Amino acid sequence: MQFRTMTAQQQQERFEAIIEAEGKVEPKDWMPEAYRKTLIRQISQHAHSEVVGMLPEGRWITRAPSLRRKVALLAKIQDEGGHGLYLYSAAETLGVSREDMVSDLLTGKAKYSSIFNYPTITWADIGAVGWLVDGAAIVNQIMLQKASFGPYSRAMIRICKEESFHQRQGYEIILKLAQGTPEQKELAQDALNRWWWPSLMMFGPNDDASPNSAQSMAWKIKRISNDDLRQKFIDQTVPQANFLGLTIPDPDLKWNEERKAYDFGEIDWEEFFNVVKGNGPCNKERLRDRQEAHANGEWVREAASAYAAKKAERKEAA
Ligand code: 3HC
């Protein structure tokens, strides 16, 4: 039944029935305006995160310690760019334009994940980013594969297939260093010290401080809460750090036999909101680099649109 011929009541009921039945809402389906808006918000921020996330790793392509490491890092960064394109395309199906989303990022209006505002100081940071940042992203993105919006769920299924390589190559870098000379092991420990807490912040504020979670869970966009995903990440990562012989920088971290989970220390939410507000160590650098990359890519966009116009002209003339 075409939703245009339905009453508002019927449209709402049909939308709720799809959500209830674990179905997928597709772009052509009727959806509440608020559902559309929160999807545009989340998917565009997710896309921005993928694109900005290329910057901290990009700085190490020319300094990778071997050709093998360079090739793996290049492949990972190219994947992230592709993930950004899938997600911008998924957001566009909701009626927002690519230009508007990109302009929101370049003008500093749009959010992207706080994690990418931290510096990659040594090669070990590239390992920590793959191991911890992609590790945390995978925990979140596996959940998002079950999101109720079709294009987002399908983009996540595709992206998750590539993320596991990202996490594995990072973990292998850290493993090599942890099993190397004392200086190399120290590099790995220093990177863990600096990336552990910001990785926990990737999951967002505590559930009781999250303005979006309740509605997002009701619409089955978010399927598991911020705190539960964070706990899942901690419980799977601590044994990996133990195997590496590295120490998680949290004196309150302790296995809780009753909960069958790790108790952990208080996250510094002041730091989190400070970074989200734009006062992190690298926010300004990331924005400047992104603006520069966009400006340098102007000729590619011009050539692509000139080609498209020519093609349309020829089609018209045929
Ligand atoms: N960085 C920046 N902003 C954050 C944040 C973070 N780590 N965590 C939460 N926020 C923002 C939210 O966007 C929201 O602000 P807004 O209302 O202005 O958009 C506010 O803080 C409150 O947070 P909520 O928990 O209420 O918001 P959400 O329900 O949207 O949950 C989220 C936050 C869990 C990050 C959710 O948006 C989400 O799952 N997003 C998709 C996944 C994603 O973006 N991951 C980022 C990393 S992508 C990546 O790492 C790529 C990998 O290949 C390396």
Image (spheres, grey):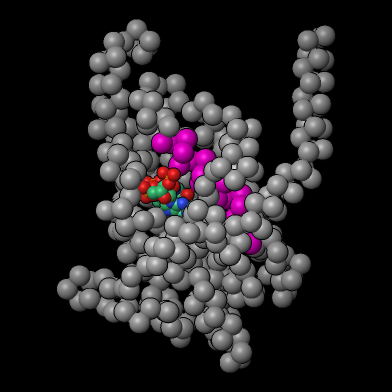
Q: Residue at x 66, y 58 (%)?
A: 285
Q: Is residue 122 above or below residue 285?
A: below
Residue 43 highlighted magenta (yes or no): yes
State the image coordinates of residue 163 (x, y, percent, origin top left).
52, 56
Q: Quadrant of the C terminus?
A: top right
Q: Nearer the viewer, residue 149 or 121?
A: 121
State the image coordinates of residue 276 (x, y, percent, origin top left).
49, 54
Residue 25 visible in the snapshot: no
Q: Main secondary structure of the magenta part?
A: helix
| Boundaries of the magenta span | 38-56
Residue 201 occupies which quadrant of the picture? bottom left
Q: How many marks?
A: 0
Q: Residue at x 25, y 16 (%)?
A: 9
Q: Nearer the viewer, residue 58 or 295?
A: 295
Residue 8 visible in the snapshot: yes
Q: Residue at x 47, y 35 (%)?
A: 40
Q: Residue at x 32, y 32 (%)?
A: 23
Q: Is residue 244 left or right of residue 11?
A: right
Q: Is residue 20 left or right of residue 152?
A: left
Residue 42 occupies which quadrant of the picture? top left
State the image coordinates of residue 279 (x, y, percent, origin top left).
54, 59
Q: Quadrant of the N terminus?
A: top left
Q: Nearer the viewer, residue 23 or 287?
A: 287
